[in-house]
Amino acid sequence: MNAETGLSAAALAAHFVETHWLALKDTDLASRTRSWQTALTDHCLRVPGFPVEYGGRAWPDTALCDWWALCAEHGCPMPDPVATELVGPLMMLTQSPQQYRRHLKAIATGDSAWEVVCLDPPDNSLRRLKTLDQIDWVLLIQNQVSGLSRLEILRPWPGMAQNLPPTAVDFQTSTLLSSDARAQLATLQREHQPIAAIWRNRELLRTLRAEASGDPTDRENQRLCELEILQTAQEILCLRFAQSGAPEKRLVVTQAAREIRLKSLQLKHEQLGYYALTEATPPGQNERQEPIKAPIDAHFMIEPMSLISDFFINQLETNA
């Protein structure tokens, strides 16, 4: 399938959202979401920025901005950012991305679930980014006491559920993605800024607005207004920088979006109060009459730039 121009991409995106999401608004949410996910796969729109040979459409950044803005505006489910914005781009940064074609195609079709695990010396303790019921592959960041840290691809190993490190047998079938994890992740941060992450914040802010008080003088409401204004500004700036071809400026936008997300989550925790921290005993005793609907599960809200900055890069050894 040939890549469309910006105009045809915008027309296709609008038609797609209308047909495969808005037209199903009277369908139950589970069925509607399944239909949407199937349509994303059928039309190569889960990762439209991927090259065509890897299951994408090779859309330029301007078309990606339009696409994710449209999805955010109508509340369309967005794909797993760990697979689409972290694992996939890391593979495409390698010298021979063709060897990962099978993985990239599976990411583009939503047929593989990924978890990220960090293995720390000296006791080989594990830090897991997320836990899902079904994991197909693991991106392992193996820190070293000395030397360069590594990126490897493994199947989930038997002891992973008990937070046990992989054994020598488990490593026999692993694939080395990079022998210098820090350099690879730094390149990812510089060259593959997650445009979708800019608009992913909108759903979180929309949920916060639904739970906010109607008092314009309320401090919580004022903080939310500030975040909404910042969010609108970041969306506009991201589109303008994409149009002008200024990736170094868009990197600043991505970092600002990360700050918006962190502040939004802080405000969400304050809205929840003790309901976010305490266990109901007996069940339901400390619940509100209408419990707050969670904006999005933690797995969905992970922003890979936060992952790189906070979860891994600061931990990677540099004493090569």
Image (tube, rainbow, N blue to C red):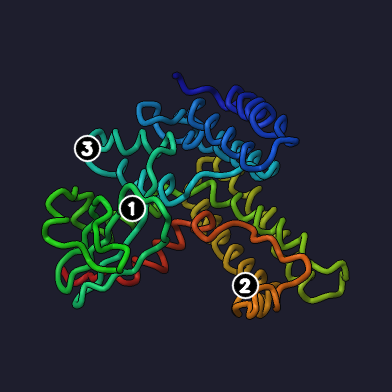
State which tag comes first along the sequence, 2 or 3. Answer: 3
Residue 297 at x, y = what percent? Answer: 56, 58
| Residue bearing the label numbered 3 | 96
- Image quadrant in which the N terminus is located: top left
Q: Is residue 53 above or below residue 173?
A: above
Q: Residue at x 58, y 33 (%)?
A: 35
- Image quadrant in which the C terminus is located: bottom left
Q: Is residue 253 above or below residue 52?
A: below
| Circle 1 SS class | helix
> How far apart, in angstroms, are the residues tagged by discs 2 and 3?
41 Å
Residue 96 at x, y = what percent? Answer: 22, 37
| Residue bearing the label numbered 1 | 187
Q: Is residue 158 left or right of residue 247?
A: left
Closer to the observer: label 2 or label 3?
2
Closer to the observer: label 2 or label 1?
2
| Circle 3 SS class | loop
| Circle 2 SS class | helix
Amino acid of disc 1: Thr
Q: Residue at x 69, y 29 (%)?
A: 18
Closer to the observer: label 3 or label 1?
3
Residue 182 at x, y = what percent? Answer: 28, 61
Spot the residue most to the top.
1
Q: Residue at x 69, y 53 (%)?
A: 232
Amino acid of disc 3: Ser
Q: Is residue 110 above or below residue 136?
A: above
Amino acid of disc 2: Gln
Q: Is residue 96 left or right of residue 250?
A: left
Q: Nearer the viewer, residue 222 or 100?
A: 100
> How far apart, in angstroms, are the residues tagged by discs 2 and 1?
29 Å
State which tag comes first along the sequence, 2 or 1. Answer: 1
The reply to whether residue 208 is visible in this rendering is yes
| Residue bearing the label numbered 2 | 266
